[in-house]
Image: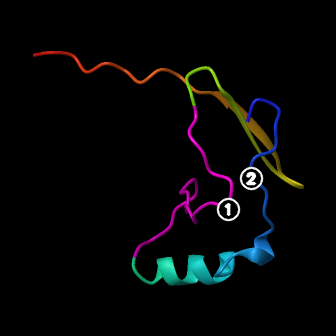
Amino acid sequence: MNDRLVQSAFVNEMNFSPEGLVSYISQAITLLPGDVVLTGTPEGVGEMQTGDRVRIEIEGIGSLENSVAPRPVAALI
Protein backbone atom coordinates (compact mmCIF):
# COMPACT_ATOMS: atom_id res chain seq x y z
CA MET A 1 0.00 0.00 0.00
CA ASN A 2 1.43 3.36 -1.04
CA ASP A 3 4.63 1.59 -2.22
CA ARG A 4 5.05 -0.16 1.16
CA LEU A 5 4.74 -3.94 1.57
CA VAL A 6 2.10 -4.68 4.21
CA GLN A 7 1.09 -8.27 3.38
CA SER A 8 2.86 -11.17 1.73
CA ALA A 9 2.20 -14.90 1.64
CA PHE A 10 2.83 -18.02 -0.41
CA VAL A 11 0.20 -20.44 -1.69
CA ASN A 12 1.78 -23.31 0.28
CA GLU A 13 1.03 -21.37 3.50
CA MET A 14 -2.74 -21.57 2.92
CA ASN A 15 -4.83 -23.80 5.22
CA PHE A 16 -6.40 -25.48 2.18
CA SER A 17 -4.93 -25.85 -1.31
CA PRO A 18 -6.48 -23.89 -4.19
CA GLU A 19 -7.29 -27.21 -5.88
CA GLY A 20 -9.04 -28.48 -2.77
CA LEU A 21 -11.04 -25.27 -2.39
CA VAL A 22 -12.21 -25.29 -6.02
CA SER A 23 -13.16 -28.97 -5.73
CA TYR A 24 -15.11 -28.35 -2.52
CA ILE A 25 -16.92 -25.26 -3.84
CA SER A 26 -17.74 -27.02 -7.12
CA GLN A 27 -19.69 -29.66 -5.20
CA ALA A 28 -22.22 -26.98 -4.22
CA ILE A 29 -22.18 -24.47 -7.10
CA THR A 30 -20.98 -24.26 -10.68
CA LEU A 31 -17.90 -22.07 -11.02
CA LEU A 32 -17.74 -20.19 -14.31
CA PRO A 33 -14.87 -18.39 -16.05
CA GLY A 34 -14.33 -15.05 -14.35
CA ASP A 35 -15.64 -16.19 -10.96
CA VAL A 36 -13.48 -15.14 -8.02
CA VAL A 37 -12.87 -17.31 -4.97
CA LEU A 38 -11.90 -15.24 -1.94
CA THR A 39 -9.79 -17.18 0.54
CA GLY A 40 -8.96 -14.69 3.26
CA THR A 41 -5.91 -12.60 3.91
CA PRO A 42 -2.48 -13.01 5.49
CA GLU A 43 -1.27 -11.05 8.51
CA GLY A 44 -0.92 -7.30 8.09
CA VAL A 45 -4.45 -6.20 7.23
CA GLY A 46 -5.19 -2.61 8.20
CA GLU A 47 -7.47 0.30 7.50
CA MET A 48 -7.21 2.05 4.15
CA GLN A 49 -7.92 5.73 3.62
CA THR A 50 -9.28 7.65 0.64
CA GLY A 51 -6.43 8.26 -1.77
CA ASP A 52 -4.34 5.27 -0.68
CA ARG A 53 -2.89 3.26 -3.57
CA VAL A 54 -3.23 -0.50 -3.28
CA ARG A 55 -1.16 -2.82 -5.48
CA ILE A 56 -1.49 -6.59 -5.58
CA GLU A 57 0.86 -8.91 -7.41
CA ILE A 58 0.84 -12.60 -8.18
CA GLU A 59 4.26 -13.82 -9.23
CA GLY A 60 4.22 -15.13 -12.77
CA ILE A 61 0.80 -13.61 -13.50
CA GLY A 62 1.03 -9.85 -13.02
CA SER A 63 -0.09 -6.97 -10.84
CA LEU A 64 -3.09 -4.69 -10.37
CA GLU A 65 -3.12 -1.23 -8.77
CA ASN A 66 -6.12 0.83 -7.66
CA SER A 67 -6.70 3.94 -5.59
CA VAL A 68 -9.13 3.97 -2.69
CA ALA A 69 -12.09 6.19 -3.59
CA PRO A 70 -14.35 8.00 -1.12
CA ARG A 71 -17.45 6.11 -0.06
CA PRO A 72 -20.47 7.28 -2.06
CA VAL A 73 -23.06 9.18 -0.07
CA ALA A 74 -26.50 7.57 -0.24
CA ALA A 75 -29.13 9.70 -1.92
CA LEU A 76 -31.96 10.87 0.29
CA ILE A 77 -35.34 9.88 -1.06
Residue 6 versus residue 3 in the image, above or below: below
User: Considering the image in quadrants, where does the N terminus appear?
Assistant: top right
Q: Residue at x 50, y 67 (%)?
A: 31
In the image, is 38 to the left or to the right of 56? left
In the image, is 5 to the left or to the right of 72? right
User: Do tag 2 and tag 1 residues touch (Cβ < 8 Å)?
Assistant: yes
In the image, is 77 to the left or to the right of 38? left
Q: Position of residue 45 (x, y in %)?
A: 62, 51
Quadrant of the image occupied by residue 49:
top right
Q: Residue furthest left?
A: 77
Residue of label 2:
7
Q: Residue furthest right?
A: 60
User: Is 66 included in the stretch rendered in magenta?
Assistant: no
Q: Position of residue 37 (x, y in %)?
A: 55, 63
- The residues colored magenta run 29-48
Q: Residue at x 57, y 63 (%)?
A: 40
Q: Secondary structure at mark 1?
A: loop
Q: Secondary structure at mark 2?
A: loop
Residue of label 1:
42
User: Is 41 included in the stretch rendered in magenta?
Assistant: yes
Mark 2 neighbour class, 10 Å CA radius: few under 14, some 14 to 19, many 20 or more: few
